[in-house]
Image: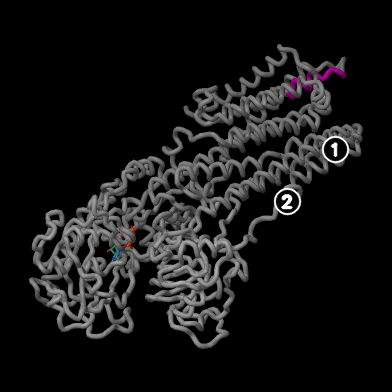
Amino acid sequence: MINQNWHTLSGEETLEALQTSPAGLSTEEIAARKEKYGPNELQEKGGKNPLKMLWEQFTQTMVLILLAAAVISFFLGETIETIAILAIVVLFAVLGFVQEFRAEKAMAALKKMSVPTVRVRRGNKVQEIAAPELVPGDILLLEAGNIIPADMRLLESASLRVQEAALTGEAEAVEKFSQALEIEDLPLGDRKNMAYLGTNVTYGRGVGIVTGTGMQTELGKIATLLQEVKNLQTPLQQRLDRLGKMLALIGAGAAALMLGIGVLLGESPEEMFLTAISLAVAVVPEGLPAVVTITLAIGAKRMLKRHALIRKLPAAETLGSVTVICSDKTGTLTENRMTATTLKLPDQHVELEDLQEKSGHSETVKMALCIGAWCNDATLSTNPEHEEFTIIGDPTEGALLVAAARAGLQCHFENMPRVGEYPFDSDRKRMSTVHRLPENSPGSFFEFWRDTNFMAFTKGSVDGLLEISSHIWVNGQTEKLSEAWLNQMQQANEALAREGVRVLGLAYKTLSELPQKPEADLEQDLIFVGMIGMIDPPRAAVKPAVAQCRKAGIRPIMITGDHPLTAAAIARELGITENFKALNGEALLQLSEEELREAVKEVSVFARVSPEDKLRIISALQANGEVVAMTGDGVNDAPALKKANIGVAMGITGTDVAKEASDMVLLDDNFATIVAAVEEGRVIYDNLLRFIKFSLGGNLGKVFVMLAAPLFGVHIALRPLQLLWLNLLTDGLMGLGLGTEPAEKNTMSRPPRHPDQPVLTAPDLRYVLWSGFLIGIISLGTGYFYYDPGNPQDQTWQTMIFATIGFTQIGNAFGLRANVKKPFSVKTNPLFMLMTFVTIGLQLLAIYFPPLQKTFGLAPLTAQQLGISFGLGILLFIANGLERMLNKK
Ligand code: ATP
């Protein structure tokens, strides 16, 4: 369907050219087109090339140092050593590569999950499908917040505005229309009856016909990525990268120094070279990058299980230091299951429950309910058997439709065609529709509007609506909206809101002609009809989650577009606040930056805020040193989601634009899920820290052994090969086991970690130092004990060092697990126990299996010797326990 000039065709011509109709394509046609055009996807170019990934593994500082060690061993004639070092380099590189590759794959899979769904008309039915399913000729329904999922010619536009920066670089949204254009070679930005893949609907509604999909779109031509899920390094990863490089360089430096001194002192250069290599190998934390990547990836997976989809990997870590969670109310804290309960009219108060179907309602009641049903974008489907309604669309609007239907009102939808509108937005907090009145009014309250051609209906926040109303409808008459009426209506609104009820005002206006500019012509001089109150119960899981938050030192804050009293009532019910303190958008505007910084320390409920206010609130919180998670769903929320430390988008009700701007998506829209993700974030950080303490302590021990050995007259305590093996088992296997530990009991009952806190705090550093020295002293001491200068061929002493380092490291790992109270409980982390058995098994194999034994230059230990070595391992576990006891005191 290559036609570069869709914009010059009329709507009908486009339909004809694409062989479709406003009712949409048939099932057979869709299948045929899918076959012909393939899925509506861009071919990815952003993914990393596997070869490049592999190459990067080999060019890391650590690996380069190991490679240098291999080359030197080769020239020293140490063939086995050379091969072994190379083998381990390859092993680590492959492991690193596999990890990164898998992480990339996992992110790609996550990305697939965040593919937007779109609304199409097919076979005369509106359906929701995944964007890749679209084919040319599909009829697509657009609304604010959609990312345009394909190229399309617009058939309808109701104030549709599209932001096309992705394509044209123009940040300002463009108003779209459906009329054909004349000039053929218009630049894309001027084709105002077209909408292009990758651009965003910022406002209004529209209908379009898909003209191009996937690579046959304008964006496909320039083939950038629509939805890039960024695989950034986390702050900790960056710091660890630097640490790893630094250690590698220190290792290389220390080795060179040792070599120089040794040779100067007249030692054999060959021996000294070998020692130097060993030292370098001992320092380099070979397992570090792989374990960190795996731990993060596993953490992200655990979060997904709890319905939090991580879009940017650094979020998995940042979540652990969140201090404030700012949450929307409707749908996140509450269920977004609205039920209209009360109708408050100037002359009547009606409990909707009491309103019997088809009984003689007053004209005003009918009018109010019908205005709610007309000024409405939702639809109801009824199941006559169960008398149940299914709402398609916004729950608030659905509740209004249900209220009218329950009252048995017909509302004559077909006689009142909608001919114009001013769509809802969360800044104005209202919407208006324009309808043509029927020629022969079907009786009842239509009588009042007999002399008019058009009607405009407006519904929205009562406070706002009263401001733009000049009259009020009382007892079938319009009256001036006097001060007294104004007060009375405001009080009624507040009384309802105080009960936690969401209140919508209803108003109308008669028009003699169709308004040209809805923004200018509607929403002024309205006639206020009344208000309708609806309840939206809090989600069951939220109250305990709020309590958990508080225990974890995290402050929950409610930020909502709803009325301050409604907001405060719900906030109190959920335990977010004890008082009725709520700041509203207007008051917020009056505050200076400093005043706002003070206010956000106190106030936990912000109501009637606009998305722009959200930005100010985040800035104030961040200026106070808080780490902020902020939820959002609308287009206008995108800047706030980007600005927050963790932008959280709603998975169900969120717009594509909000999801795109977020770090994390809540698949179930539930506040409790944010808290669960925070917990997982803390677990990830704990585990990384655990692993780092373990790995650094072990390496320190090995370096100590190497450096102190000459004091006992031993040149090379451990050979490079033996050290590599130990690093592989401990850092690699045991490290992995530690990286997957479950949550500590106190994970959510301690304050959040400060984001600027160094990786290792003073106590952590102390732990690394003493555990490292202990491992070193014990291992070297045992070696010394078994060292027999009279029998230099006997390798028992070296094997004892080798075995003891292994066992003490395992003991250390046992001490560092989460919930160490039950020392040998397998229940805590099966992978850890498995790794322990594998490590011990491999150690025994190296010591007792002759070919390995020979390669490693080890001697078989007696049962007693092995027992001693094992016992020393337990000693480390005990030392760890003592430290914990001391710390507690
Ligand atoms: P939250 O920000 O917590 O999700 P919210 O859903 O109340 O809360 P908005 O959707 O911005 O926030 O709504 C703000 C206000 O706009 C509501 O309190 C209501 O007065 C009004 N409003 C909401 N939905 C509609 C609608 N469909 N038509 C007219 N007015 C609406």
Q: Tell me the quarter of the picture where residue 532 sits.
A: bottom left
Q: Main secondary structure of the magenta part?
A: helix
Against 29, is 498 above or below?
Answer: above
Residue at 74% from the left image edge and 23% from the top image edge: 845
Determine if residue 580 is in view: no
- Dot 1 alpha-carbon crowd within 10 angstroms: few under 14, some 14 to 19, many 20 or more: many
Residue at 69% from the left image edge and 46% from the top image edge: 97
Asked if residue 1 lies left or right of residue 808, the reply is left
Closest to the observer, 687 or 767: 687
Against 686, is 154 above or below?
Answer: below
Rendering coords of residue 384 (x, y %): 24, 54
Q: Secondary structure at mark 2?
A: helix
Closest to the observer, 608 or 829: 829
Against 383, is 347 above or below?
Answer: below
Mark 2 and mark 1 in contact? Answer it, CB < 8 Å: no
Which residue is under mark 2? 56
Query: Any magenta on residue 139?
Result: no
Rendering coords of residue 322 (x, y %): 46, 48
Can you tell me which quadrant of the image ligand 1 is in? bottom left
Between discs 2 and 1, the one toward the N terminus = 2
Closest to the observer, 759 or 633: 633
Camera-near label (2 vs 1) is 2
Q: Secondary structure at mark 1?
A: helix
Which residue is under mark 1? 259
Q: Which residues are magenta?
A: 792-802
Query: Which amino acid type is marked by label 2?
Result: Glu
Asked if residue 512 lies left or right of residue 269, the reply is left
Asked if residue 108 lies left or right of residue 660, the reply is right
